[in-house]
Image (cartoon, grey):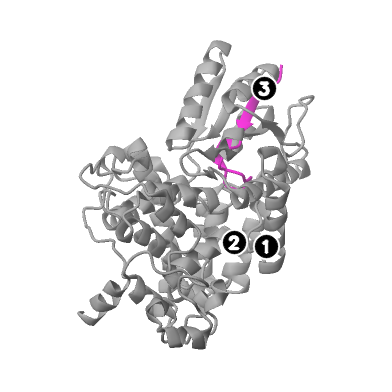
């Protein structure tokens, strides 16, 4: 009897540098690759009225799974696709295929680890092992110079420690062939409609992609193409530090986070390519800075591993029960819809709602505004990002929101952004705001970020009616200009 291993693909939708899948191929005579879509991922959150996984992220996931299936088919195998309860389906498939073990990537956040535990319990009476592999970070968890329980409380300390005492492992090669377990039928890739998305919403999403264009197509193939183009063809990497706080265009950001989020790209491969670029072309602050961002990503994953469910509670990693938060649905909805009356905030939220993406600079500002200016419970904002962001990663998303809301493990405080100052620094001419809020297109650059102060004469001159064509501000925003003057 051939030795068989079921490989459960999760957030590691790639063949390159995938230790778990490579080990399965080394260990077994035949491998059964499986991906399970869980309907609960797409359910509506009852208190908030939007889906846990929205249409942008769902589409990207479907594309990524389809791409993985094509890659496996090119290597003589297939991807077994199922829809339902992961643990039940995987245990049944493992039994039906007479697998000796199930291999998978190791996750660190609650929903994912609960599924791991459930699967392990179901496999035990079948005498089938569950082996989990760490495949998600730049630095392997076993290579850290400290126990995770002693994780440094600041990113800077973490970075200094790992850079001084840890090495990045070399990426594992892509397998040339995959020996496949025969006679296990697959299912068709589900559609967006199968997960309850309406025909109208699907059509609107397709129209947006066609008219606005998108840089994001799910899958390892597209991720590798983006890496090749960004680093080697366009060489945007050499100016990354100068452009990373941009708001518009293709070149200001690597956008690697989208493919990293589902494991379509390995952080170690990105690191290897940057190091090769430094050796063959140029090494500067920009090439290092993208590595710096990968280390930040690592830190948030290890924070999630260290602190567990505290990451997802309003009291945060600090377990700060003294902070009180508003649970105001109307105020939250104004933020969600990009109708706060603060142009820089509204423009960023409208971009997110239209495209499923927002710049890092935008994310910091809108999250600070919700948590620190409106005082609305930050977990609502984190959940909304989870629903809409194509590049959603639970560790980075919830870790960043902890950080901005002042309940993270970093002991320093004051993550409160001056929105006016930020807008003037990063969108001085108002081009970004005017792109996403066309009703303000005629407002001059020197008043675009303080449109709420326009006189009735000026409103008539620029075709704006505050409270009608553009909303009145939800707070008094002039505090920011006063802060600027008092600096």
Residue at 45% x, 72% y: name it.
Answer: 343
Which segment did they paint magenta? 1-20
Residue at 62% x, 49% y: name it.
Answer: 55
Classify residue 205 as left or right of residue 110: right
Q: CA distance from mark 1 to mark 3?
A: 39 Å
Q: Residue 165, position in %: x, y?
A: 32, 51
- What residue is disc 1 on? 208
Q: Kindly check if marks 2 and 1 are in contact, taking CB atoms under 8 A apart as contact.
A: yes
Q: Is residue 171 visible?
A: no
Mark 2: give few (<14), some (14-19) or many (20+) Cα within 10 Å: some
Q: CA distance from mark 2 to mark 1?
A: 7 Å
| First along the sequence among labels 1 and 3 | 3
| First along the sequence among labels 2 and 1 | 1
The dominant secondary structure in magenta is loop
120 and 346: which is toward the camera: 346
88 and 467: which is toward the camera: 467
- What residue is disc 2 on? 354
Mark 1: give few (<14), some (14-19) or many (20+) Cα within 10 Å: some
Q: Quadrant of the N terminus?
A: top right
């Amino acid at each position: 009897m051939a030795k068989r291993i079921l490989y459960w693909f999760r957030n590691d939708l790639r063949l390159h540098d995938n230790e778990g899948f490579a080990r399965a191929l080394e260990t077994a005579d035949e491998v059964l690759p499986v991906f399970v879509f869980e309907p609960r991922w797409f359910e509506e959150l009852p208190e908030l009225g939007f889906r846990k996984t929205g249409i942008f992220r769902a589409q990207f996931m479907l594309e990524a799974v389809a791409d993985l299936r094509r890659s496996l088919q090119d290597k003589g195998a297939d991807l077994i696709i199922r829809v339902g309860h992961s643990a039940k389906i995987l245990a049944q498939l493992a039994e039906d295929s007479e697998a000796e073990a199930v291999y998978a990537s190791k996750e660190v956040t609650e929903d994912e680890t609960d599924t791991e535990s459930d699967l392990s319990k179901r496999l035990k009476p079948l005498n089938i092992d569950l082996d989990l592999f760490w495949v998600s970070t730049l630095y392997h968890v076993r290579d850290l110079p400290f126990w995770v329980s002693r994780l440094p409380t600041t990113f800077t300390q973490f970075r200094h420690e790992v850079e001084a005492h840890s090495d990045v492992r070399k990426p594992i090669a892509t397998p040339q062939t995959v020996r496949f377990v025969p006679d296990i039928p697959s299912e068709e890739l589900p559609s967006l409609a199968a997960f309850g998305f309406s025909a109208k919403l699907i059509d609107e999403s397709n129209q947006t992609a066609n008219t606005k264009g998108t840089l994001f197509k799910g899958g390892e193939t597209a991720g590798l193409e983006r890496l090749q183009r960004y680093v080697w063809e366009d060489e945007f990497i050499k100016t990354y530090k100068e452009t990373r706080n941009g708001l518009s265009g293709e070149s200001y950001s690597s956008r690697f986070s989208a493919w990293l989020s589902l494991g379509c790209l390995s952080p170690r491969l990105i690191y290897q390519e940057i190091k090769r670029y430094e050796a063959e072309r140029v090494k500067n602050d920009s090439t290092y800075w993208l590595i710096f961002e990968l280390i930040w990503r690592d830190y948030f994953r290890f924070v999630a591993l260290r602190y567990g469910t505290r990451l997802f509670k309003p009291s945060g990693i600090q377990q700060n029960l003294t902070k009180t938060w508003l649970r105001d649905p109307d105020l939250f909805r104004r933020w969600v819809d990009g109708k706060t009356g603060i142009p820089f905030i509204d423009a960023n939220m409208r971009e997110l709602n239209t495209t499923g993406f927002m710049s890092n600079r935008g994310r910091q500002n809108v999250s600070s505004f919700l948590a620190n200016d409106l005082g609305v419970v930050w977990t609502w904002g984190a959940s909304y990002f989870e629903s809409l962001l194509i590049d959603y990663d639970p560790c980075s998303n919830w870790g960043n929101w902890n950080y901005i809301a002042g309940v993270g493990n970093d002991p320093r405080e004051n993550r409160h952004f001056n929105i006016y100052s930020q807008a003037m620094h990063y969108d001085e001419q108002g081009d970004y705001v005017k792109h996403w809020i066309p009703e303000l297109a005629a407002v001059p650059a020197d008043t675009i970020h303080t449109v709420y102060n326009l006189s009735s004469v000026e409103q008539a001159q620029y075709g704006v009616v505050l409270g009608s064509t553009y909303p009145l501000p939800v707070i008094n925003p002039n505090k920011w200009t006063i802060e600027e003057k008092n600096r």
